[in-house]
Amino acid sequence: MKLMTKELEKTFEKYPIGSQNGLFGNSKVIVKYFNPAGVGTWLITEGNKLENGDYELFGYCHLGDDQNAEFGYVMLSQLEKLQLPFGLKIERDMYLPKDCNLLDAMKSIGIEPPSYFQKDNTEEIEI
């Protein structure tokens, strides 16, 4: 399965890194990547294409523990290179709703949203 499509490339042009700062749970999820053989979910909200063709992605990274999940960066090439059991690879959720926000995506897969998502989004919170 291709993790990056032409449609995603066009969408990332509208959502470069930094474009959804301060939106937290209201950030639009552009793509969800996941480990089909175990823990590991990346809810990607922003991305930049690099000169070498790779993508620097930003989003909520959950590796099986709600308390240690965090916003962070991951390279598309890193996700593509991960070797999983049984010859599996990281997959892209093809059924993610087009206008899914981060809070709804988290709830739909059983991730406990961090406490700062509950704060009033009108105040600026540093990540």
Image (cartoon, rainbow, N blue to C red):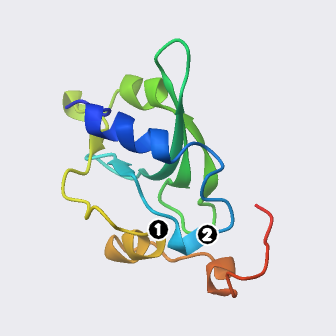
Mark 1 neighbour density, 10 Å: few (under 14) some (14–19) many (20 or more): many
Quadrant the C terminus occupies: bottom right
Circle 1/circle 2 CB separation < 8 Å:
yes
Q: Nearer the viewer, residue 22 or 88?
A: 22
Quadrant the N terminus occupies: top left
The answer to whether residue 92 is above or below residue 119 is above
Q: Which mark is residue 23?
A: 2
Identify the residue shown where x is 62% and y is 55%.
71
Q: Position of residue 40 (x, y in %)?
A: 42, 50
Task: Please tell me in which quadrant of the rendered image residue 50 appears.
Answer: top right
Q: Position of residue 18 (x, y in %)?
A: 66, 49
C-alpha gap between disc 1 and disc 2: 9 Å
Q: Amino acid at mark 1?
A: Leu
* Numbered disc 1: secondary structure: helix
Q: Position of residue 12 (x, y in %)?
A: 45, 41
Residue 33 visible in rendering: yes
Task: Name the residue tied to disc 1.
Answer: 102
User: Is 93 displayed left or right of 107 in the figure?
Assistant: left
User: Is 94 displayed left or right of 12 in the figure?
Assistant: left
